[in-house]
Image (cartoon, grey):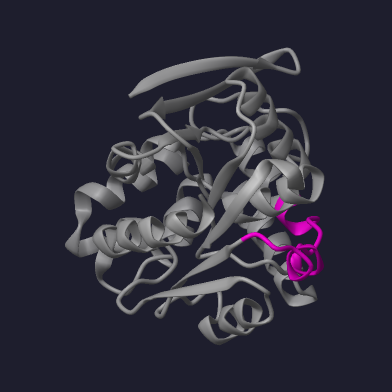
């Protein structure tokens, strides 16, 4: 696995690449970083060229101001793709990374061979969810350590963090190493994002949904309904996972992605 840096808007974006062949981007979620995909990236790299960026403000990548919009993050992906002369690729987005993938597809549909929304949704925030984002900003400013710990615990199945302390610690450390303004910028970007549902209902490319049956953040039945509205929608269910399926059930997620990628290339 190789680590790269890219100059983007006069600052630095970091990302990791591995493997050869048709390209797949792994886009992490809110409070995450590319390194959390190490196991999945290594598995997929036996057949594909896999690229995992640290999105703005996350991991080793720079921050870019008050709001990290999904459009800004999509432009980072495009800059990386151009740097490697990539023409068409699959976007796998976990949670916030799925919002980035949809924004990217809206701007550059000709470049996208497929999208896999892993524990993610194509819809914009509801009014209730936007209020929750505002409260999250208040909690973040009050105490970053408590905010990140409570937020991440709620994203895993009950008891999972305690049963897998080493993995959960790596997730928690990724979040707590972030600067407070960067976390706030991502929260604002997610709160203000546009719905991607109309974009994908008109498209012909495969679109997968990886759905955690125990997810308390996204209702499985709502994601199923979204998937069933698509021309080429494929649902993959993970019975024992919440919102971090690729860490909670790595074997099942790897198998699902392999299946989905065969539909894209």
For residue 128, side relative to residue 143 (left or right): right
Q: Residue at coordinates 24% horizontally, 60% vertically from top-left? A: 251
Looking at the rendering, which quadrant does residue 41 occupy? Answer: top left
For residue 159, side relative to residue 264 (left or right): left
Q: Residue at coordinates 79% horizontally, 51% vertically from top-left? A: 106
Looking at the rendering, which quadrant does residue 7 occupy? Answer: top right
The percent coordinates of residue 179 (x first, y second) are 57, 33
**Residue 177 appearing in the image:** no
Above or below 151: residue 70: above
| Farthest left residue in view | 163
Q: In the rendered structure, does residue 194 fall within the stretch colored magenta?
A: yes
**Residue 215 appearing in the image:** yes
Above or below 116: residue 100: above
The percent coordinates of residue 85 (x first, y second) are 62, 21
Question: In this orientation, which residue lies closer to the viewer: 140 or 37?
Answer: 37
Q: Residue at coordinates 42% horizontally, 27% vertically from top-left? A: 17
Q: In the rendered structure, does residue 64 fall within the stretch colored magenta?
A: no
Question: In this orientation, which residue lies closer to the viewer: 139 or 183?
Answer: 183
Can you say which quadrant of the picture contains the N terminus?
top left
Q: Which region shows up in magenta? A: 188-205
Q: Residue at coordinates 41% horizontally, 19% vertically from top-left? A: 3
């Amino acid at each position: 696995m190789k680590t790269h840096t890219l100059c983007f808007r006069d600052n630095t974006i970091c990302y990791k690449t591995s493997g050869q062949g048709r390209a797949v981007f792994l886009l992490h979620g809110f409070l995450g970083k590319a390194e959390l995909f190490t196991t999945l990236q290594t598995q997929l790299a036996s057949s594909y060229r896999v690229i995992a960026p640290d999105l703005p403000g996350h991991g080793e990548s720079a921050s870019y101001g008050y709001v990290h919009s999904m459009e800004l993050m999509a432009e980072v992906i495009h800059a990386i793709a151009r740097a490697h002369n990539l023409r068409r690729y699959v976007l796998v987005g976990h949670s916030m990374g799925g919002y980035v993938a949809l924004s990217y597809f809206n701007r550059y549909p000709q470049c996208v061979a497929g999208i896999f929304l892993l524990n993610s949704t194509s819809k914009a925030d509801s009014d209730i969810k936007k209020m929750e984002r505002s409260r999250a900003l208040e909690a973040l400013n009050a105490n970053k350590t408590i905010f990140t710990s409570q937020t991440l615990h709620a994203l895993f199945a009950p008891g999972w963090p305690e049963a897998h302390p080493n993995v959960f610690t790596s997730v928690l450390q990724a979040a707590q190493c972030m600067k407070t303004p960067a976390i706030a910028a991502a929260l604002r970007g997610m709160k203000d994002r546009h719905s991607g549902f109309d974009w994908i209902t008109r498209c012909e490319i495969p679109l997968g949904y990886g759905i955690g049956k125990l997810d308390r953040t996204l209702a499985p039945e709502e994601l199923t309904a979204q998937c069933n509205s698509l021309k080429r929608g494929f649902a993959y269910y993970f019975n024992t996972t919440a919102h971090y399926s690729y860490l909670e059930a790595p074997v099942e997620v790897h198998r699902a992605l392999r299946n989905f990628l065969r539909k894209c290339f």
